[in-house]
Amino acid sequence: MGGGVNLFHYHLVTSRVREVEARYIGKLAFDLVARHGRIGEDLTSYEPGVSWDELDTLGFKLRLTELERGAVNVVVQPGQWPMPRVDHLGLALDEDEFDEALERAERADLRVQEHGGRRTFVSTNAGYRLELHPPRDWIDDLLGQGDELRLSELHLKADDPEAKAAALAQILGTERIGNDVEVGETLVRFVAGGPQGRPELHGELFV
């Protein structure tokens, strides 16, 4: 696959959004980009500086929180699980890698969805999705912050680590060593003892 692929984003689902958000901001020094949601029927977003108490008073219902530091973007969405689970991984690829990944997904009869021409999702059939991006200016800008922080390792807890790892390696056309998959400069490791469906966030290593 080469060095053209970058794992720059992951999307978490949890019933403890505020605690998870606080961990990234307080412990890991991520910046809050915005909280997106609605008040009544109106979609709205709030940038940093508006407290949860103020949002509660406004009747704000969160759809997702976006956090960022260096070359890493994390989204946290309300859901049913106390321990965060990964809905999808966001990957930046060069043009050839992007086309080849979609071809592999189609040959494997995996579901491919395009959202407004900006995002392409591929179902792995292993409980999580991949969000694939060809070169884009905003991703280049984000990845350009890699000297400040990048994701070195992402550990995910799963019921069938080998199947989860094989699904990722298959779509990306990269090598799998046991339950480990090298995604550019990031090691994605699936560990045993997790739930069925979406894998559980088990650990992160930033450098």
Image (spheres, helix red, strand yellow):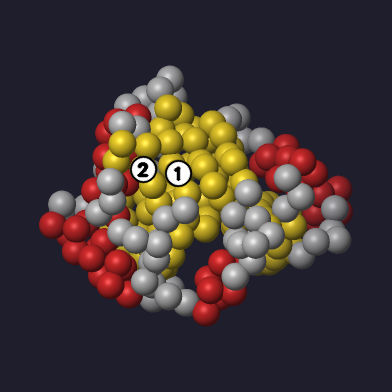
The amino acid type, in three-letter code, at marker 2 is: Val
Instruction: Report if the CB atoms under discs 1 and 2 are less than 8 Å apart.
Output: yes
Q: Residue at x 31, y 68 (%)?
A: 98
The residue to which callout 2 is attached is 181
102 shown above or below 160: below
Whether residue 63 is visible to the viewer of this picture, yes or no, is no
The quadrant in which residue 133 appears is bottom left
111 shown above or below 167: below
Residue 103: mark? none
Q: Residue 34: x, y in percent?
A: 71, 62
The amino acid type, in three-letter code, at marker 1 is: Leu
The quadrant in which residue 28 appears is top right
Q: Residue at x 66, y 36 (%)?
A: 16
N-term mark: 1 or 2: 2
Q: Residue 148: x, y in percent?
A: 69, 60
The residue to which callout 1 is attached is 187
Q: Residue at x 36, y 25 (%)?
A: 159
83 shown above or below 118: above
The residue nearer to you, when weighing 44 against 40, is 44
Report how far apart the C-alphas of labels 1 and 2 lie in the structure. Answer: 6 Å
**Element at label 1:** strand
